Image (cartoon, rainbow, N blue to C red):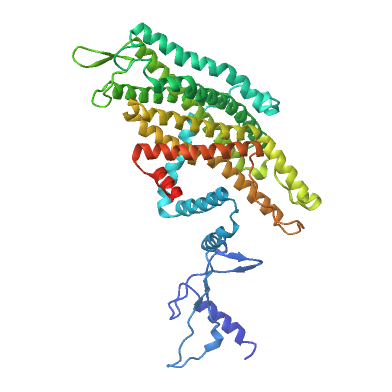
Amino acid sequence: MSAVLPSVAAGQLLTHCSPTRRHPWRATPPVKTSQMVTRGSEPHSLALKCVPAWSSLTPGPYTRRPVPTVRKMPNPSQKSSTRSLSTAFDAAPSQADAFAFAMVSHIITAILRSPFGRILAPLLRIVTSALQAISPATLARTDRNTRLNRNPLAFYKSVVKYVFPAAVFLCLVMNGVMSFLAGTFSGQRLSYAADLHNLFLYLSVIPAYVSVALCLVLTCAIAWRKLRDHAEQVGSARNSSIINAIRTTACITVALGASSFFIVQYQNDLADPGVIHEVYWFFHQTEMGGRSINIAGIYYFTMNGTLLFITLVAVLCFVSVSFEIFRLGRSIELSTFAITRQGTIDNGDNYISLQESRLKGYLSESTWCYAGLKLSVCLYVVNIWIWQLSPAGRVGNVHWAIFALVIVGVVFVTIPHLYLASKWHNHKVSCVASEGNPISLPRYETLISPTVEKVVVLIDLSLLTLLAIVLDYQYGMSGVTDIIRFMRQ
């Protein structure tokens, strides 16, 4: 009996678990090998665990048959997401900007993993692809040992000393000459000599932001070529002169189209007596009470279109550099700055500091792009503020300008370097936290040089103050008024 029982029991077990035989247990078909999951070194099947048949070979009429049990395996994605959400707060860096970026990144990731994110993700990919298509590329190779890399302040001084006086001549002097030819240099109405707001802009603010914008374009050209060469070296990007030419052409086309559109809207608002009551020096008033552009107006609107074109090109150049910074962050483990486990074991903290210093030096031009765009936005806010105080501040383009400055100056400009710093910090922690490394976990470090960081702090304080003033003046948000009132109390 003992020799026969195991074979009988095995036969009954196979019979009870067979999917072709009707049985009170109703066991599910056996799971294939590809449906097995592994935890550690032991495979675990998701199929039903059938109770051995010899545990009840002769059940009675009132004997309860054994109930099959299902081993419910945990969902790895749910477990990892729960763990990441629970530890996100603790793992985030202590710096305010890095902490906020880490929290926003986790929120965005959770949204993209939701059903709503399945609809939003394709739209985001379309927007990013369109932005990358219209961002320019450097067509020629640049020398890595440039004057910008050796002495940035001397490089920018050499650019500003030519651009600033040229901008003063084209804005202040040429508009004066054109208004004199049109007969509106002086007179009873709002003449050129009486337009104090535009005179102040032409003498200081506009030449300053034109100089900064051209410095930004040159810096982005050098930084983009440098980052692109590194991406091609590690295999994360391929060089294509045709695609680079198409991107540059698309950038110029889009910038020309957008600047033309907004200048036409600006011209229509200034020519409408219901919007602007004063007749500017670049308009001729007709006998019927209408307004037509004179010779000074042709030059004035052409000049403003050119200024807006330079601004849009500078912003798109920064977009191009931002995409390369994102590319470097995604492939940081494949880059030449990657931290190896053996290097941390052999050299410890000195190895990580050396790699971080190399990365900061490599990103020197990119950090100057970051500071340059911040300074450009700050100067544009000053321009908008003076614009608001003038009679032309009632045009509709003011709202678009304020919206663009808030998005670019507060949100967009800070994302690329925060993303790269976050990726670099995670890479350091993952390498150091691996088994066998005797050094402590590294702290979060920004990848911006100390000199640029001090400049950016001053620009940020000025930018936030000016934005508060502009928003309070335009929309009556009374933010500045409440702060001053609270400080007096």
Query: In front: 168, or 107?
Result: 168
Q: State which quarter of the image contains the N terminus.
A: bottom right
Query: In front: 64, or 290?
Result: 290
Q: Residue furthest top?
A: 181
Q: Residue 63, how many percent across, how many down?
A: 46, 91
Is residue 445 placed above or below 293 in the rendered structure? below
Query: In front: 386, or 266?
Result: 386
Q: Residue 249, how many percent across, how many down?
A: 49, 22
On screen, residue 311 versus residue 238, left or right, reads left
Residue located 61% across and 84% down the image: 6
Is residue 81 placed above or below 428 in the rendered structure? below
Q: Residue 435, how many percent across, how many down?
A: 73, 59
On screen, residue 329 versus residue 393, left or right, reads right
Q: Residue furthest left?
A: 288
Residue located 54% across and 79% down the image: 13
**Does residue 51 appear in the picture of this structure?**
yes
Numbered circles on residues, count? 0
On screen, residue 317 versus residue 342, left or right, reads left
Query: In front: 371, or 423?
Result: 371
**Does residue 449 appear in the picture of this structure?**
no
Q: Residue 316, how many percent across, how many down?
A: 50, 30
Residue located 45% across and 34% down the image: 130
Asked which quadrant contains residue 306, the reply is top left
Q: Residue furthest front?
A: 489
